[in-house]
Image (cartoon, rainbow, N blue to C red):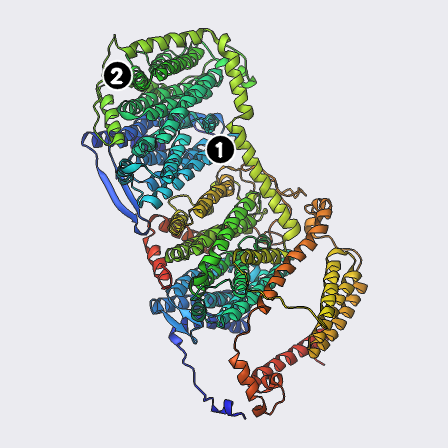
Amino acid sequence: MPQQTSPPARVATRDPLAWAVALVALGAFAGCIALWRTGGGTIDVSWARELDLRLHFSFDGIGALYGLLATGIGAAVFAYATAYVPLHLDHQARPARDRWRFWPWMALFMLSMVGLATAQDLILLFVLFDVTAVCSYFLIAFDRQERASRLAALMALLVTGGGAVAMLIGAVILYADHGTFSIPELASLLRTQDEAGGIATGTTVAIGLIAAAALIKSAQVPLHFWLPRAMAAPTPVSAYLHSAAMVAAGVLVIGRVFQLVEVAPVVQDGMLAIGLLSIAVGGALSLTRDGFKQVLAYSTISQYGYVVMLYGIGGRDGATAAAFYVVAHAIAKSALFLTAGTVTMAAGCRRLSTVGGLARELPVLAVASALAAATLSALPLTIGFFKDELFFRAAAEHSTLLGVVSVLAAGLTFAYTWRFWGGIFLGERRVGGAADDAAAAAKPLAPVPALLTAPIAVLAVLAVLGGIVVGPFAELASDAAGATLGHDVQLQLAYHLDARETWMAALAWLLGGLLLATPKAWGPAARALSRAGERFGPSHVYELSLSAVNRWSDRLHDVEVRDLRSRVAAVLLPGGILVALGFAATPTAGVFQIGSIDGTDLLVVALLALVAIAAGVVAFTHQHIAIVLALAVVGLGLATVYALLGAPDVALVAMLVETVVTLVFLAIVAYAPRGERPSRRELAGVASEPQRRHTHSRRWRDPLIGVVAGAAAFLVIWGALSRPTPAERVVDELVRLTPAAHGRDVVTVILADFRGLDTMVEVTVIGVAVFGVIALLRRGRTW
Amino acid sequence: MTSALVTAAVRTPHIDVAGLSPLIALAVGGMLALLVGIFLGRSARNVTPLISLLAIAASIGLSIWQFGEGKSVVADALAIDDLTLTLNFVLCATGIAAILLSWRSRAASVAGHPEYYALMMLSLLGMLVLVGSQNLVTLFIGFELLSIPLYVLCAAEFRKEGSLESGLKYLIVGSVGSATLLYGLALIYGATGSTDFAGIDRALAGGINGDVLLLSGIGLTLVGLAFKASVAPFHQWTPDVYEGAPTPVTAFMAVATKVAAFGVLLRLFDTALVNAQLDWAPIVAALAAITIVVGNVGALSQVSLKRMLAYSGVAQAGYLLCGLVVGTQLGVKATVFYLAVYCAMNVAAFAVVIARERASEYGDELPAFAGLGRSNPLMAWPMTIALLGLAGIPATAGFIGKFYLIDALVDGGYAWLGIVLVVGSMISLGYYLRVIAAMWMGERSGDVTPVRTAAPAPAGGSAGTPPVMAGGSQEADAELARSSKLEPEVVGVAWIATAVVLFFGIIPSPLFELAGKAGSVFTGIF
């Protein structure tokens, strides 16, 4: 509901909040450059000494690389968003103050990314992982009126949060084994241990868990499905989080803990496999998608697959190539994401099938985004060329097979990148697809604010500059690789026409071109893969498990509300089980002594059997009178047992009480109204329906509860009776003193003499209570 | 009379008034509130809570004075040591919060202000006795002194069916719990020949040797106390009673009772029964795991916030049990730390629930919170932070507390329970986030007349629009004038509790020190 008319976009672009955040990003970028050039710095303060938690940040190579990415790409995206967010809100007829739901989270996200880049402590990594997850939750759900956005946000949070939990568990296992959370300390400890004869399995598991958390964050197969769904976010969020920040956090963590991963070859091999799988699945699915951002999301999965694979290859080549790849990819991919946003703003459509031929109307955008696409597809004179060169070198050095695979992968990249660009900017305007897009396609293009193009152009220029003057970027990557590997790395990049990598690249372009030209050949296969993924894939498992948990919750609720609340059995049954478990767990051999049965004992046994049968009747029958009579049998039977066991006084009292109670019960049953008044909940229809359905199970449940509770009570009593009697000196003393107290039996003496005061007070209390009851019965009149 | 009785010289017992002073302050406060209330007419409404607050403040002050003395009073039946006093700080803080939240509630005026506050004070006294008890008899006295006023308080709003039902239910099931506890205590006494914790400890010095009597006693005692701490599977009363009771009473019950129950669990199991640790630890660990799973799964489908917080309280009880399982000083410290943090988080959440209940027609159900972020950020922020804290998100004290517990578990060799704890927290995000999402992303719907459907139990998706269930709140029903005007004391309580959650989330050291002192009183464990 629009609560006020939104101000025109032009005014809103002067929004001080937006510009403040963008300027902070720019300032932070400058700061990061300064820090990088001056060699960085370290903060190490104790946070919670008792838990061995430290705030340990160090601005090393990794910190510089990811810090620069987070702030630099951040500055570009924020500048873009100053124009985009007002338009976005305007389109959805939302008030301008909703921008407060955007900018603070973006700023916090950037801050936590910088923190993540410099953190040197596993717990800090976990904390900041969670902070980024929470920020992304609110940013993805920015269009909060859309159910799809909210579900996507929840999915992203649950999946990446689950990853963070894995990381925490891994960190705690490492701490338990090695006594520190600090990554550098762990690295040196583990290396020593590795050289001394291998690491423990627990440590490998812990490292695997941490790596898994990182892979989930980088949207690697099979837990990649949250990323395409997260495209429900506004475009600047996607451009920032899903190209340079959130997904980069995963590979950042891998880079940070790489020295731990190195000592666990299983984990490293797993990363290699997952990387390859992600390249293939992401690339193939990217070719089948129609939505701009869907294409880009799957391409991101595929691209981070490269990085993960490079870390899987490891060594100097792998680490340097991975670091360089992250930079080049982030620049190109954020530019492409921003392009998608601008096109949507201008033409109003979000699918490849409804656009086309926009190069004529948006020439600057077309050129800028073509440069970005060229970067991603590794054409020469862009920074992207070098990313693939390093990639090819690392792969070919590892094995020939991997070299071949890397060429195929690069071909795939070439194809989906240019399919995206060509689909938007080349050919004729197409109409089709969804109805709203079709309607939008008929309209002329909306004017595009300069700020929706300029940041893309800046990024494109940067990509080309990087292709010509590659030195600073190479230095950045080698610094990061140095921090990753723990020793200095030199990286020299230049164009070599005759190198093996150049030929591999040329082969890849050729392959990509072929793929582009023959969509009919691979189309059905790729679409079948996509359908299979939706049908049986991990996202389906996610949905299933969510609904299963909800179902359990409902069932638990039903059981508790219907059957267990206000039932004494709810305490007795688990109590009985608990006690029985205690017996089962404790050796009790020789504790019990079973004597022989003779004489009057036989009668006692028969009576007890009768009592048991009567108790069974109480549990089974549904007629009130029968219950009362059966209870009377129980009581009178026990009274007889007392008499037989030599306690006639107790038997008399029990007899009397039983008789009175039975008569009172019978009177109540006789006077009680027929039928039960339905309760409020039953009137509301909550509990009545299932109750009827479960009558059968209830029939058996109550007796079962009785049997278990009774068995527990039996065990307890048996345990008590079979204990050898301790020497009871106090009792002996009392009995000895009885004649001196002028009494003939010890009970009377205790009541009247030793505890005389107590007895008097008790008698008084009972007297007062009797008067109170009489007063109540006389309705407040006092005689 | 007899020679034996005549020769027994009359000895005047030594009464350590200074040591008992925190208890005396509470008792005197409760009685004063009751007596003064008789002579005041309408002004009792304001005077009795003030008296109670002053008494609690006095108790806090006296506790600070006695801190570090480490006394054992009333013939060693009551320990006034750092653990007792630390927990007294927490108890008193929750007492202050409960009194402030009750100030304008219907429950207090329906039940009568003097009686209401007096009962609350006496219950608080019972809790203090319970956490300080080092004798089975004082333990039971404290247990009953805490329970009986609560039975009455639950039914305080006795004209409402729900409140009455809640009180009666609590009374019946609570009596069974008490009986179980008493049976267990009797068996422990029978097996060891002593009611004194130190005496029990001495009797068990050689291990328990499969003594079934003692084992049954421990089991039944554990059941009785687990009942009070709402540990699954003895928690079934919790959601119903929490939902039906007047919300300020629910808030008080949810936090203070748990402090008391865990205080005595720690003392009983870590001093008297510490020699049997190998026997009870696996059972307690199993209970903790069951509690964490049941509480978290149960909370997922709740629409009423009070029910949800009840189940969440069950899950939190499971986390707290983790500190008991390991039987180490570290475990005690972690439990004390988490207890304090848990109280702050729950007080903040309940304060917001109370505010919404008084303002919205939906009462304490999820729709009442929809769009709160926009309409009332002053209330939405405390709720958000409290729920994030309960879920254990970093930068809140909940994270530090859980981390401390995990630390204790790993240290004590129960790493698997730590994993259960972490996974449980993960599940808990599902329902905490639902509320947060409703507050910040939902559209405001509090002013619309709710559609009272007869829908079956809620089956709503994790983030979808929840169905409206019949039976809204008591506070919002009927003639109570509704206004979105904020009551300063409720806002104050919510924000102070939130500040505590954030402060100890970022600078946990002061609370660590306090918890460390509390944990060091158990010299029998490491």
* Image location (x, y in percent) of residue B173: 61, 60
Residue B78 is situated, as x and y percent measured from the top left of the image, at 43, 71
Check the image and report above or below for A664 versus A497: below
| Nearer-the-camera pick, B476 or A424 | A424
Locate residue A651: give its quadrant: bottom right
Identity of the amino acid at label 1? Met
Question: Badge 2 sits on which subunit?
Answer: A
Position of A368 relative to A223 (above/below): above
* Image location (x, y in percent) of residue B524: 37, 64
Residue for point 48% across, 63% down: B209
The answer to whether A697 appears left or right of A254 in the picture is right
Residue bearing mark 2: A465
In the image, which is nearer the foreground, mark 1 or mark 2?
1
Q: For the view shown, which residue lies furthest in the left direction? A: A38
What amino acid type is highlighted by mark number 2?
Leu
Which residue occupies 43% across, 28% down?
A7
Q: Is residue A708 above or below residue A431?
A: below
A656 or A190: nearer the eye?
A190
Residue B265: image tag: none
The verdict on a common chain for dots 1 and 2 is: yes
Q: Is residue A133 left or right of residue A734?
A: left
Which residue carries the number 1 mark? A155
